Image: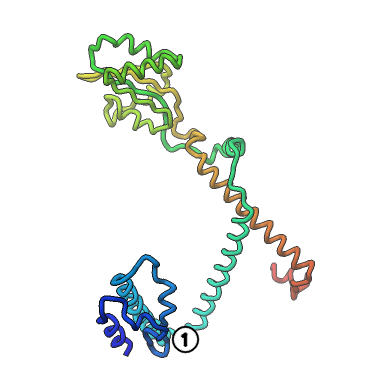
Amino acid sequence: MASVAVLWLMSACRELPSYFQGSEPLARVNGKTLYLHEVERTAPEEIVGDDSAAYYRLYVDRWVSRQLKLSEAEQLFSASEADIEAMVEEYRQSLLIRKLDQYYVDRQIDTLFTDEAIQSYYNNHLADFKSDRTLVKGRVLRFPEGDRRTKQLLQLMQATRPESRQDLSDLCQKNNFDLLEFNSWVDYEEFLSHLPTLRHDDYSSLLAQSGVQQMRDNHSRYYFQLTAVRRAGEALPLERVSETIRRILFNQRHNELLRRHEEELRQRADAEKQIKLFFGEDEEQNIEK
C-alpha cells in the first residue's frame, strides 16, 4: 500500500499537489505515518513550483524506504534490542554533555593569545618542533649572461641599505631581470629549483655561505644569497608553527575550563548533598584491588 501511495504522489501534476497543501498524512507504512508538517520543517525556503513538488515527492519516497528498512531491521535484530537501546542512550548522554561543554566554552573561553605566550610555549617546547627538512630564506637574481650591468648588479646584491635593495628591484623591473625574494621560509629544494642545479647533486655546502654566490648556465647568470637557514633536525621557525601553537594553547584553555566547570558542579552537588556514594573506605580498597 505504501509503494502505491508513493507512485500516486509522484504522478501528480507539476504544480505542488493539493495533497501537499493540507494537513492530511502523506504516507503510512506499517502503522507509522508521515504528516505534511514534518516535511515542511525540512523544506528549503528557496524552492518553489516544480522544485517544491519534486522535493516533497522525493522526501516521501525516501521516508517510505527508510520505514521499510527499519521494519525489517527490527524483525531481524529484535534479540539485540536491549543493546541497541543502550547504545542510543549512551549516544544521547554524550550528545547532551558535548552540548553542555560547548555552551560553557562559547561563553567563557578567551581565544586571544599574545605573541609573548606563543613565544614562551615555543621556547619551552623546541624539541617538539623538529624540522624534517632544510628551510631557507633568501633571494635569487637571474639575468642574461654578458650583460653590461653585471658588476652593478653584484654590488646592489651585496649592499645592505634599504635604498640599495630598492634600486636593485627597480633595475630588475626596468630590464625584465628575474628577482625572486624569499622573505618567508621555503624548502631548500624549492629555492634550488630556481638555480641551474641538478636534481640528484648535493648542494649542502652552499648553506654555509652567507654572502652572495654565483652560478651560470648557457644563457644566464645567477646571483643568489641565503639570508637564513634552518637545517633538518633543528627546530622549525616560529613562523611555521605559530598557528599550531595557537591550537595547542586553545585546547589547553578549553580543557582547563571544562575541568573547572566539572569541579564546580561537584562542589555544588556536595554542598547540596546531591551525591550519595554507597561504599566506605573498606569497600573502596576492595575496588582498588
219 sits to left or right of 104? left
Q: Position of residue 101 (x, y in %)?
A: 60, 61
Q: Position of residue 162 (x, y in %)?
A: 45, 17
**Who's the residue at 40% across and 67% down the image?**
45
In this view, which residue lies farthest toward the left?
218
Location of residue 199 with respect to 32 vertically, above or below: above
**Who's the residue at 27% across and 85% down the image?**
8
| Model colouring | rainbow
Quarter occupied by the N terminus: bottom left
**How many labels sit on residues?**
1
Quarter-of-image position of residue 260 = bottom right
Location of residue 41 with respect to 256 vertically, above or below: below
Label 1 crowd bin: few (<14), some (14–19), many (20+), radius 10 Å = few
Q: Position of residue 159 (x, y in %)?
A: 42, 13
Per the image, label 1 sits on a secondary structure element best described as: helix
Q: Nearer the viewer, residue 60 or 199?
A: 60
4 sits to left or right of 40? left
Quarter-of-image position of residue 223 = top left
Amino acid type assigned to the residue bearing label 1 in the image:
Ala
Q: Nearer the viewer, residue 76 or 25?
A: 25
Quarter occupied by the C terminus: bottom right
**Who's the residue at 55% across and 75% down the image?**
89
101 sits to left or right of 194? right
* Residue where numbered disc 1 is placed: 79
Quarter-of-image position of residue 288 = bottom right
